[in-house]
Amino acid sequence: PGTMEEGVVYYLPKTQIEIQVTATRVTYTPGELCQYANRYLRLQGISAQPSEHWEINGIKVNTIGVPDTQKAYSIKVKDKMVTSQVELTENGIIKAINTTAPEEEKVSKGKVLPKAKRVDPRNFMTEEMLMAGSTNKMAELIAKEIYNIRESKNSLTRGQADYMPQDGAALRIMLNNLEEQEKALTEMFSGFTERDEKTFTFYIEPEKEMNDQVVCRFSKKLGVLTEDNLAGAPVYLSITDESKLPPANEEAKAKKKLEGVIYNIPGKGKVTVKTTEKTWFNSELPITQFGETEVLLNNLFNKKVNTRVIFNPTT
């Protein structure tokens, strides 16, 4: 594709289905005082064993246009024609004739937030706690400190503290510091959980209807897997042709032999993505493979007519 002496060669796009699976890895690490969680803080069901599992957050489905190398056409440049200004995408798909296509809106990808650093609970432990003669004694002292922090928070919020801050901002700073201390010390009993979110992207190019094709697999233990990894349960993709276009009369088309700019009229496909437990996506999307091509006649581009055309590079 590109500009040559005899004209401009371009591709038409075909549709790829882009499937984005967002999953979170949840890692639990038990606290070093977990065996005393029920005795001193009345926290029940606290596990002493580390664990890891995955959860699916969501599945997004988009269509993107890629060059269809089976649909390469040329626009011949003639003296009486004004189709010399042809704009192509970087990969050769036609975008515009005699004008400039508007810039595509870039889909903003969510910012990856930096992981919050876990505060070391020993930063808030007194000498008495650190020098305790046994783990049991340390747990008892830390539990007392947690209750003291809670009392301090209650006194501040009720306005009953001996030394009340001068304004609301100072009060918020004091409460935040107390909450940070309480959280860090409580995690020594309850353990802590880390959540790490990841997005996995898969591309499918439908040439015909599909019924429950396996795109990928998902395991609560291993996360998102490739379609051939049988350790996970399948994520299915189904595509139904909803175009209802009458069958093209190829003989009539051949007789016309129309000359001009060939473009796509996309069809519609009903796209469904599901697992055995849930349907994650169910909607109609434009799919060029289910449509047909038409032609903009050459007489639209003679010097008497100021024709400008913008094409959708996705369809």
Image (tube, rainbow, N blue to C red):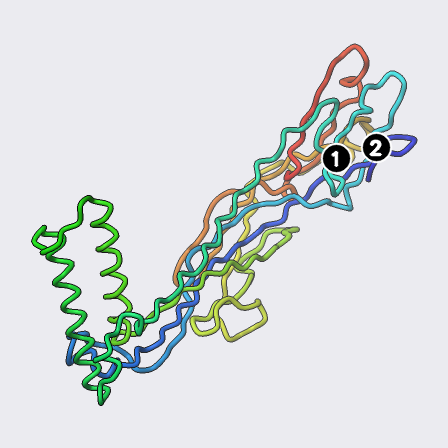
Secondary structure, mark 1, is: strand
Please name the residue that numbered disc 1 is placed on: 88
Secondary structure, mark 2, is: strand
Toward the top, the furthest residue is: 304
Whole-Å distance between the Cαs marked 2 and 1?
A: 9 Å
Quick check: marks 2 and 1 in contact, CB under 8 Å? yes
Quadrant housing the C terminus: top right
Please name the residue that numbered disc 2 is placed on: 8
Q: How packed is label 1: few (under 14 Cα within 10 Å), some, or many (20 or more)?
A: many
User: Residue 107 falls in which quadrant of the image?
Assistant: top right
Query: In the image shown, does 242 or 88 lie closer to the viewer?
Result: 88
User: The disc labelled 2 sits on which kind of residue?
Assistant: Val
Quadrant housing the N terminus: top right
Q: How packed is label 2: few (under 14 Cα within 10 Å), some, or many (20 or more)?
A: many
User: Residue 104 falls in which quadrant of the image?
Assistant: top right
Q: Residue 19 carries which label?
A: none
Query: In the image shown, does 197 or 5 lie closer to the viewer?
Result: 197
